[in-house]
Image (cartoon, rainbow, N blue to C red):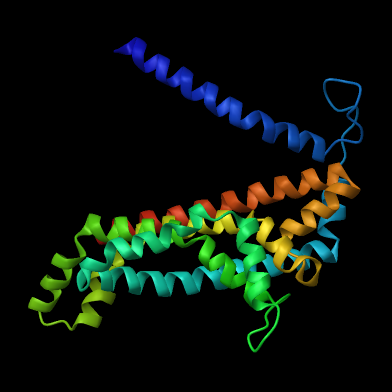
Amino acid sequence: MKNRLLWHKALTAIVLLYLFIPLLATFLYSISTDWYRTVLPEGYTGKWYGELVSDPRFIDALGRTLFVCIVTILISLVVMVITVFAVTVYLPRLERLLQGIAMLPYAVPPVVTAVGLITIYSQGPFALSGSVWLVIGAYFVAILPYMYQGIRNSMRTVDAISLLDAAELLGASKLKGFWLVVFPNILPGVLVATLLSFSILFGEFVLANLLIGGHYEMIQVYLVRRMEENGHLASSIVVCYFIFISIISAVVLRLGRSAKEGRT
């Protein structure tokens, strides 16, 4: 038993080391002056981070990306929570249909999605080509599987139907029962789905580049363009991206843990 535990710890350490080495190399390159002829960088500097923070394009691209991701996730949360709840409680026969629709983005490559959207919305009364709202709509579709699966699993885990019945027996209306009883119980799962969706959208490049590109430069497009100019600067962007996602993950997981503790 003890040997097996040591083996599991050793295997976990090897996997973590394997995942950590590329990030460490990226960080070293982001603070290096030159790194071509030696095992370790020939010199170290923080000017790449200073140049990044002082670049108004980076600040603007980060703000645009956050705006698009947050708006998309908020719309998706409202639509999917209400839809999954209604189907789970009142229309269980439609669950397979909803699941099939939600899983469709898995089968459609982002390039095909982008080309199709550009073709449909490039002209006519609903011309949105080059509009940020077209990107938000595409992002909404892209995260459908993750939002649906996370919310659906939470609904099934807490048995939303029994919770709602219990709330109604105690005198609560359907709306009040959902808001005060069902939703707090599925909140940890909703937060995990939100975190996963945010991570995917924050790093999504194909849709952002094809649908809007330089008209509304987001962090993914900015990263690729700066990578062509300076690899050190691009590495610093990647490190900042990783730190930012780690902070967001820690905050969301902390909120989920607090919600779970408050529920118990």
Q: Residue furthest left?
A: 169
Residue at image x 67%, y 86%?
124
**Image location (x, y in percent) of residue 98:** 34, 65
Question: Residue 37 lies in what quarter of the image?
Answer: top right
Q: In this rendering, is residue 117 above or below 228?
A: below
Residue at image x 88%, y 20%?
38
**Image location (x, y in percent) of residue 45:** 88, 40
Q: Is residue 4 left or right of residue 218?
A: left
Q: Residue furthest bottom?
A: 125
Q: Is residue 125 visible?
A: yes
Q: Is residue 228 left or right of residue 255?
A: right
Q: Is residue 185 visible?
A: no
Residue at image x 37%, y 54%?
257
Question: Residue 3 lies in what quarter of the image?
Answer: top left
Q: In this rendering, is residue 77 above or below 36?
A: below
Question: Residue 68 lies in what quarter of the image?
Answer: bottom right
Which quadrant would the N terminus be assigned to in this image? top left
**Image location (x, y in percent) of residue 264:** 23, 57
Q: In this rendering, is residue 236 above or below 261?
A: above
